Image (cartoon, rainbow, N blue to C red):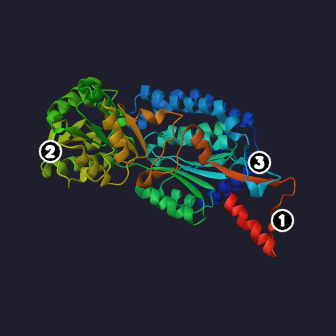
Amino acid sequence: MTESILPLSPSADLMNDAFDDLRDRSKEQRLLSAKARIKRLDALYAEVWRRRDDLKVAMWEDFRKPGEEVDLTEIFVIKSEIKAVKKGLRKWMKPRRVSGGLAHLGSVSWIRYEGKGVALIIAPWNYPMQLVFRPLIAAIAAGCTAMLKPSELTSKTAQVVAEIAAAVFPANEVSVVQGGVDTASHLLSLPFNHIYFTGSPEVGKIVMRAAAEHPCSVTLELGGKSPVIVDESAPLKATAKKIAWAKLSNAGQICVAPDYIFVPRAMEKKFAEAVEHAMTELYPGTVAENPDYQRIVKDVHAARLLELIDDAVSKGATVAHGGQSDANARLVHPTILMGLSPDSKIMEEEVFGPVLPIIPYDDLEEVVKAVNGRPVPLALYIYSKRSRFIDRVLNSIQSGGASINNSVIHVSSNQLPFGGHGNSGIGSGHGEYGFREFTHMRGVYEQRVDGAASLLMPPYTPWKTKVIDRLLRWL
């Protein structure tokens, strides 16, 4: 089915034609049975598995992603998501009866779960297969057709993704469009029924403005500065290793990566040493030669990280570990910064790289004030053995999601909603929550036996006025 793959940066006419085909098909797609939808998802995973080695090669060439992490963070996640959908889909699709009130005597009401229509899925580069296919799984489960826009920054993987989709789905059910900003801009001008975007808050605002022109619903999975708050009760070595792993996985290029850490002032130095030890334990030897350590996706992104480090140092920060980098090789070493000035750029921008600022605190209130002074983060991480401390943080700080005594791994759950709040996103994905994002909940009311409502229609005689008065007092 490779003939259904569109050329790179297709013309507006080709994209319009692809959209029209998806829209024409969407009426039939929403009527597919659970069995038919599951059959498509099984075929998708079978093709992903068949192209497993090709995906590993592509991601290594794109940004030297280790094959083991392709298995763990890309393929395993897709398999787990499909498994969760298969288990729950029939239940999710089933119409749900709801009760009525006194005004609805003689009637029945229920909710139908119907696919919204044609979905546009715009995916980022940091998980270039998972973040295309995970929302696609939800769209197919909901009964939608879909147009996929993988990131042009990971072009090798985008091509394999396009080939997988073309091998599994007819072009009028799923179509893949590859290209840059101009391509994405044209797609956003088309009247999709739902847009699922994963990326930065800045681009998310552009997507939302475009959606308002149609209008259509949106899911925005954005990012932000996800803080880590540690207290004295957290076990030092275990906490440091979890944070180091979460920060360095994917070279820190994760929307929910620990962005900056608050630690009690008395344990600041020991904590920094524990994180440094954990980093070297995870990636021993020379970082440049370590096959497990990933590269930054593009040299311009690496240069940006170097600028953040240089700016922080120029304003008084100390490089406690790392700092060596090679922008041309897209290599940024694991780096720990201490003694940061609040007006450092790294304290204003999402880091999105393997650079970890550590900030000491004396009282939790100053931490709460600092975090709440920024936009709501996508994730909040709390390391503590004290339930009162944990509850106090959860009650004081909003976030898209939260994880206690671990980091990042909560995103892999199919039972938890994953999504942001405010600047970090709108809507949720994963499991049933992803299915709901692509679903229109259609309320249906049926009058089976005439009730008393007609007795309360105009003209309003004194008798009817008295009945209405008594009804209000009785309800």
* Residue sitting nearer the eye, 70 or 403: 403
Q: Is 179 above or below relative to 130?
A: below
Q: Quadrant of the C terminus?
A: bottom right
How many C-alpha atoms fall within 10 Å of the one at disc 1: few (<14), some, or many (≥20)? few
Q: Position of residue 432 (x, y in %)?
A: 60, 39
Say whether disc 1 or disc 3 marks the residue closer to the N-terminus.
Answer: 3
Q: CA distance from mark 1 to mark 2?
A: 74 Å
Give SS at disc 3: helix
Left or right, 105 with respect to 113, comes to: right
Q: Residue at x 72, y 63 (%)?
A: 470
Residue pointed to by mark 2? 339
Left or right, 172 with respect to 287, comes to: right
* Residue sitting nearer the eye, 190 or 286: 190
Q: Position of residue 452 (x, y in %)?
A: 83, 60
Q: Which mark is residue 28?
A: 3
| Mark 3 vs 2: CB contact within 8 A | no
Residue 166 sits in quarter = top right
Left or right, 470 with respect to 254, comes to: right
Residue pointed to by mark 1? 454
Give SS at disc 2: loop
Q: CA distance from mark 1 to mark 3?
A: 39 Å
Q: CA distance from mark 3 to mark 2?
A: 60 Å
Q: Position of residue 426 (x, y in %)?
A: 49, 52
Give SS at disc 1: helix
